[in-house]
Amino acid sequence: MNSPWRFCYLTLTILLTLGLSPAYGLEEGQGPQAPSELRVEYLANPMGVDVQKPRFSWILGHTARGQAQSALEILVSTQAGVETGDMWASGKINSSDSTQVAYGGNPLSGGSTCYWKVRYWDKDGQASPYSQVARFDTGLFSRTDWKGKWVSGKNQVRTEFRLEKKIARARAYICGLGYYELRLNGRKVGRNVLDPGWTTYDKRILYVTYDVTEYLRPGANALAVTLGQGWYKSTVLLLQMNVELEGGEKLQVVTGPTWKTLDGPIVSDSIYNGETYDARLEYAGWDRPGYDDSRWSSVNEVSGPKGELSSQMMPPIRVVDTIVPLKMTSPAAGVYVFDMGQNFSGWAQLHVSGPRGAAVKLRFAEMLYDNGMINQENLRGARAEDTYILKGDGEEVWEPRFTYHGFRFVELTGFPGVPTVASIRGRVVHTAVEPVGSFACSKPVLNSLQRIIVWGQKTNLHSIPTDCCQRDERMGWMGDAQGTAEEAMYNFDMAAFYTNFLRDIRDVQDTAGTITDTVPYIWGSRPADPAWGTAYPLICWYMYQYYGDKRILAEHFDGVKKYVEFLRSKAENGLVKFSYYGDWVAVEKTPGNIVSSFYYYYDVKVLADMASVLGKEQDAKVYRALAETIKAAFHKEYFDPKTNSYANGTQTANALPLFLNLVPESVRGGVWGNLFDNIVYRNNSHLTTGIIGTKYIMELLTRTGTSDLAYDIATQTTYPSWGYMIENGATTLWELWQPRQGPSMNSHNHPMFGSVGSWLYKALAGINMAPGSVGFEKILVAPQTVRDLRYASGSVRTGRGVVTSSWSRDERSISLEAVIPVGSQAEVVLPKFNLKNIIIREGGQILWDSQGFHAGVQGIDTVKERGEGFLIKIGSGCYSFVLIGD
Ligand code: BGC
């Protein structure tokens, strides 16, 4: 059971599940391995890079432990072979950075392709082989690079053009609002759907770059675009195709008045209400050359939205998965209900054959009534209904283009004949962020929790982090976004996604510094509830902490400062008190003012920290001093010495000040004791918190040495708890602790209570960043071996490589496997469990026994006894520790 092989097996399983290969051990050749997983601006071989100094990153591999990069060399070239660095030959740069390395070569020109490779020197000065060649494409840097005109018309637009020679290189730059589907010569270009991402269109519009070389051919070509309403609620198109023919001739195809337009088979489309598609209105061949479009009208030239054109530099929304229904029932004559077995965002693909003109209706819901019919009450104003009208020629396969639903159940009516489970496929649609994390442990309810968190999180990434994906909202509610950001970063590669979202936030900021509850701003208030607005500073700061992204801090420093200054202008006696939601959807309400004051302090502190990192010493000083005054005012205002509690003494009211150390030393024990009593004795180890208290309380309990209690809370299955949702059939997190089903606010796919996800990794798997470290450079592997938990295993692919911690234990021993990326260092904490005569081995070699530390095991610097456990300092590599005692 405790064999180290089990751990290696576990790690390998995790890595293989993630589709990753271990960084060492498998390659041939000893020493430093060729860098892998090359990224530019966080993306693999990105198109449309629109910054002048893009940042590079790569993962280091080495066959030895305790290794690091001491120097690097990058070559960037216009030639695919990258024989020389004709754009940038960095030369040998002494630096340990393998992430956030900024381009330092010749100015990049818009619309070009660069190829690059990198090698590194390890800490002993040995050079690695070069990496494989990666590439990036630049976008159109300035508005004047765009030669086309914004056009508008019906929902189908087309043009034809001739190319007289073979095509050497072709790029299409497209912005089609609300949504577009681009086709060339009968084929859909790329795999993006619901594209481009939703932005504040008057401020910033995203365009998408495609390599279309393979789609074109000598002779006649046709370009066709279908447009949808999306969030823009109208249709406009700007497109430019830059084509280079063999021999060097260049030409452009751009939107303009000669393009033709006509309404196609999409009769109506709406994100909330669904899509109606009349297949009888399909125009065969309209997306191919030679089609007679003489009856189509010409498009109109329009001024287009006002925002700046900005490249969509994040993973697109895609059909990420396809689900086969679990079962089909027929609760009434002609009504068929499909259970997909999972709540998710997307749509259904319909397989049908029948007479021309037959109309099949699909309706979507999260719940069923007792009689088996779908229950759409909680969708409120969203109709969530698609209709397909058959053309009547054999099997027809259809799925909508410009809507999406949040659902587990699909109702089919109007189906010609009797459907089978094969008539429907679930199409899982969301921003295709890369999964980077995995977590599993010996407690089944926590594995279910991890599963519903991940499903809830990913299906609420739709170019912005949404609150839910089913009812008439699906908005970037900022409180939800900030609360789940750390969880999301453990589970997915969120770097490019949040880079864009932070710009979205900046786009809504006004001259007074205010931002809004939802981003883009649709619902809620300006100014945002401080617990919602805090998403701006906090997500900036998480980007720095998790990815080491200093550029984000620089880019948003002024915006965050303006926001903090706005808050300050609202402060009364040194505290911000206005609040609309506060500790939202709590079982026991906490006054909103204490929540707002907490975030005022937090935001000021983060701003001071941002200033320090950026070397803005004056600002750092000013805001650090301001934070101190808020801290004092906070205690004065909210602390009640008679009860040793803050505000009304709820779990949240006491947890917030404890979390940020706002509680003076002299009363800390008392406040903490009150929190403990409230949880344990008044609530039988259940939370009564809303989304704000929930975010901090689990981590606080672990930090204060009571992980057992946090574990009790996390594994509850009675109300209110995550386990209660699971027991009641949740496949994604609910919006409320309560099991509501009516027409009120009760989404069944709301990620905001999923903040506990980061606690699973940090506490139970034990994967933490060491205090003060950024980007997982220094790691703290400190698993909480709580109660009846027998094993836990977590893995996160950080920007520097995979970090793994897998442990298991029995009465007399604990085994732990840790994987630390090259260039990182870690402290591993192994508990003693009150054992005597302890022996610690690593890979069979003795590290510690009655004589103390045995030096000489590669990669291991020291072992020290500390308090209840041992502290082992290690460098990079894969380690198997076993601690045994009597
Ligand atoms: C949303 C929430 C949001 C809240 C703010 C709700 O309607 O769905 O998740 O944070 O409003 O009050």
Image: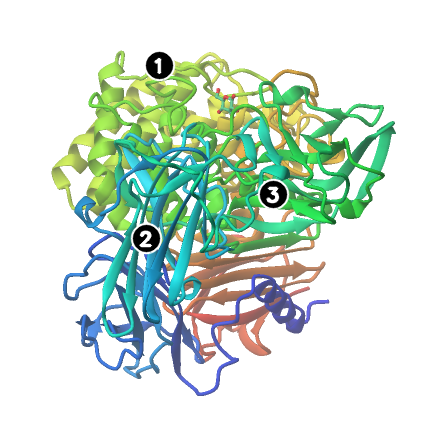
Measured from the top left, where is residue 78 in percent x and y? Answer: 24, 71
The local secondary structure at tag 2 comes to loop
Label placed on residue 455: 3
The local secondary structure at tag 3 comes to helix
Q: Amino acid at mark 3?
A: Trp
Position of residue 661 relative to residue 793, above or below, is above
Measured from the top left, where is residue 649 in percent x and y? Answer: 51, 17
Q: Amino acid at mark 1?
A: Lys
Count the marks: how many?
3
Position of residue 241 relative to residue 246, above or below, is above
Measured from the top left, where is residue 554 in percent x and y? Answer: 21, 44
Which is closer to the viewer, label 3 or label 2?
A: 3
Q: CA distance from mark 2 to mark 1?
A: 33 Å
Residue 676 appears left or right of 232: right
Q: Residues within 10 Å of mark 2 (few under 14, many from 20)?
A: many
Query: Which mark is first along the chain, 2 or 3?
Result: 3
The picture quadrant where one finds residue 154 is: top left
Q: Which residue is mark 1?
A: 577
Query: Which mark is first along the chain, 3 or 1?
Result: 3
Q: Which residue is mark 2?
A: 548
Residue 105 appears left or right of 156: left
Q: Tell which residue pokes out farthest to the left in this image.
A: 618
The residue carrying mark 1 has its beta carbon less than 8 Å from ligand 1: no
Q: CA distance from mark 1 to mark 3?
A: 35 Å
Q: Residues within 10 Å of mark 3 (few under 14, many from 20)?
A: many
Residue 551 appears left or right of 372: left
Position of residue 11 relative to residue 577, above or below, is below
